[in-house]
Image (spheres, rainbow, N blue to C red):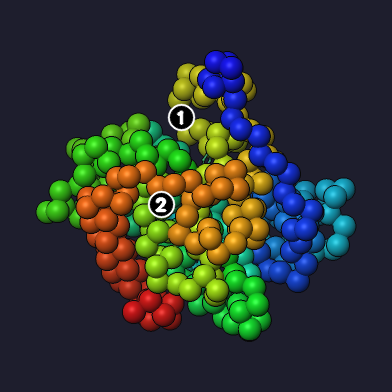
Amino acid sequence: MLAQMLFMQPPVPALPTSLNFHGKTVLVTGANSGLGRAACLHYLQRNVSTLIITVRRASEGEAVKAELLAHPDVKNEPKILVFELDLSSHSSVIAFASKLRAEIDCLHIALLNAGVFLLDWKVSPHTQNEMTFQVNYLSNAILSLLLLPLLRATAEANSLLAPSYLSIVASQKYNESRFIANPIPESTTIFDAFNDEKGFQPWSLYADSKLLVRLFVKELAKHVDPSSVIINCMCPGMVKTNLARNLSFPLRLAGRLVLSVRARSPEVGSRVLVNAAGGAGKESHGEMLVVYQALPVIPWIESKEGERMQTSLWRETVEEAEKNASGAIVAASLL
Ligand SMILES: NC(=O)c1ccc[n+]([C@@H]2O[C@H](COP(=O)([O-])OP(=O)(O)OC[C@H]3O[C@@H](n4cnc5c(N)ncnc54)[C@H](OP(=O)(O)O)[C@@H]3O)[C@@H](O)[C@H]2O)c1
């Protein structure tokens, strides 16, 4: 029992056989690796009609596409479109969203999976924002706002018979964020707190970025009707992937040891992603799903401090989206 508590994660049941994506257009970001690639395979095995995958390097995308299409379980000759997307850059996010709108006329599911785990202070050369904040939170948030009109239009074209999905990969680790014990003072913006090199705390950074994802999903859900677009996030648990690739060799080695004992395979972990982004119902709106169930928010999220952070985050994010993609908020019907 003790060994189980220390080492095992609860099993993730197989996805229901009724889950079928025939006729659907699905987007998966960060599709060349780990959970993203495994999620693509689940959609393909369940007959997705058009799969849009994003990668940072087009050549890598073509290789992943060929590999996915060659899988023996992929039988229905799906269309796979490869797009480039670099979440460290606002212009890449905006260019991607424009290209997507120009090249496809519907989007049923957006699974925003791409993310990083860094322990070094790193700044995006494109935005000058701290990199984990930029990639895990800010670009995913702006991309969400830019995708909303198409997701909503897709559901409306279908007379709201089936809602679209906007699902972001988060982490239960959000509850380890340093900002829970030490909230950002009212005099400091959240963006400035992340961009303050002097206050940099490497071991909290990933959790900090996922706390923002959790708060953003909770707030965005308040502005969107789940009959049109279900907004949710999910945590796949600990999964054996390349997420630690940027850490030092000793840390990667230690991480590999833990993963080898405790982690889920990408195939198993990505079931949680695909359930949230295509299987879950309206009750998942604004929630974080863990093994197909909503994980109750920690009490801090609903405290005065948590609500203040959520409100500030929304204001700062909307301002940043408008600054970089003028008209995005009106287009997303969020005013
Ligand atoms: N593994 C876990 O235990 C675990 C647990 C909870 C949550 N998650 C989350 O799951 C998601 C997927 O991670 P993973 O575990 O599958 O790790 P992974 O194998 O490292 O995959 C990460 C993906 O994100 C892409 N990416 C990284 N930086 C990017 C950028 N600037 N622009 C665009 N794409 C970028 C990577 O592309 P490149 O190959 O080009 O770098 C890769 O496709 C992440 O959001 C992560 O936080 C993972």
Q: Nearer the viewer, residue 189 or 99?
A: 189
For disc 1, the neighbor class at 10 Å (few under 14, some 14 to 19, many from 20) is some
**162 up-or-down from 143: above or below:** below
Q: Residue at x 52, y 24 (%)?
A: 255
Residue wearing tag 2: 214
Q: What amino acid does circle 2 point to?
A: Arg
For disc 2, the neighbor class at 10 Å (few under 14, some 14 to 19, many from 20) is many
Earlier along the polypeptide chain: callout 1 or callout 2? 2
Q: Residue at x 66, y 39 (%)?
A: 12
**227 up-or-down from 40: above or below:** below
Q: Is residue 132 left or right of residue 164?
A: left
Q: Is residue 58 left or right of residue 226?
A: right
Circle 2: element type = helix
Q: What amino acid does circle 1 point to?
A: Leu
Q: Residue at x 59, y 82 (%)?
A: 156
Q: Quadrant of the C terminus?
A: bottom left
Label annotation for residue 247: 1
Residue 105 sits in quarter: bottom right
